[in-house]
Image (cartoon, grey):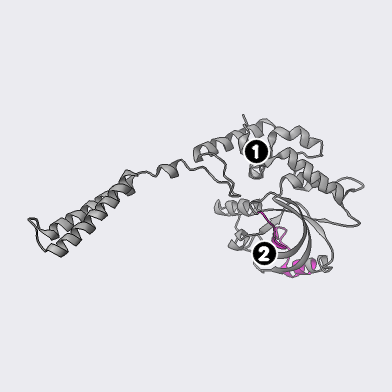
Amino acid sequence: MKKNKMIIAVIFAFALLTAVFAMSGGGNNDPAKEIQQLKQDMQTVQSEQSEQPDQVKSNETVRDQFGIDTGMTKEEYEKFKDEYLAYQKKCGIYAKDNLFYHKINLDAVDKFAEYDINLNRSKDLCTTNAFILKSEIIAVVSFVDFSIVNSKELTYPVTFKVKVHEVLMNNTEYEKIPDTLIVKGDNLNNYLFDDFESGLSKMYKNKDDKYVLFLSRFGFIEFKRAFEEKLIDRVVDDSCFEPFTFTFIGYQRKIEDNEIIFDANKNPTVYISLDQFRKNVKEINRINDIDNFYKRSYK
């Protein structure tokens, strides 16, 4: 603050002297030297100010991947994350840091179990309730169109355009979800692209079919990191990081007779009504309580 005042004072003095010498054309000192000295003084003050550490920035709090203010400095945030991952391991949960990414409340593990949620299960074995915790958006949609880039270099060569009929959950930074979302699909099974496109065309030929989609952006981050670490040779292109662009978590659930599959691993398959699923989404989110994620202590 003092240096700002000094700059203002120097500028004022410079302007004043310039005006005086312009009017009088004289004085005991050399006007050119006086003005040159003022310029040097201004440069010195500006240089000193630029070299000063920005106290505000050094104390800035970190915003997470959703733009949410964590209320922590960078050092505090990293310590908090380390404590969370250590606590996760202590709880016997060996999933990667997608639990941290999705702000899953590790203190609520027992309550989650009442909803048939086991955080150690792979996505192939998860119930729809487990997908709730690992999603950013859950929505009822219909597939409008899709396109495929015929390239084995892309992790997500498929781009779906989906129409949103109902948003069941929104844990993103977006206050409002638009009527249309972009959903990226992978081809990790390495289908021939002609067969891949033909299969998708058959699957989504009926534009009136509705599905429950579980959506997130964690896959984009994870696969990009793997590429940068040279663990995979397929890239995640920039289009994946555009606004309102997501990818699938687990599997879509087609809505038939107001029901969706709850657990596909049981024999017979277990279904759940869409109304009950809406209630589950609301209750599981209440238990998880992501608004207070950064206020908890995991030690």
Q: Is residue 238 left or right of residue 283?
A: left
Q: Report helix, strand or loop for mark 1.
A: helix
Say if the magenta span includes residue 73: no
Is residue 224 at all visible to an observer of this figure? yes
Q: Which residue is mark 1?
A: 292
Task: Check the image and name the residue furthest to the front.
Answer: 23
Task: Give coordinates of residue 164: x percent, y percent.
Answer: 76, 61
Residue range of the region highlighted in magenta in the rendering: 175-199
The three-letter code of the residue at mark 2 reads Pro
The mark that comes first in sequence, 1 or 2, is 2
> Looking at the image, is 91 positioned above or below residue 20?
above
> Looking at the image, is 285 positioned above or below residue 186?
above
Q: Residue at x 70, y 32 (%)?
A: 107
CA gap, disc 1 to disc 2? 37 Å
Q: Report helix, strand or loop for mark 2.
A: loop
Q: Which mark is residue 154?
A: none
Q: Quadrant of residue 113?
A: top right
Q: Is residue 73 left or right of residue 239?
A: left
Task: Give coordinates of residue 24: x percent, y percent.
Answer: 12, 62
Is residue 263 at all visible to an observer of this figure? no
The three-letter code of the residue at mark 1 reads Asn
Q: Which residue is mark 2?
A: 157
Q: Residue at x 27, y 49 (%)?
A: 45
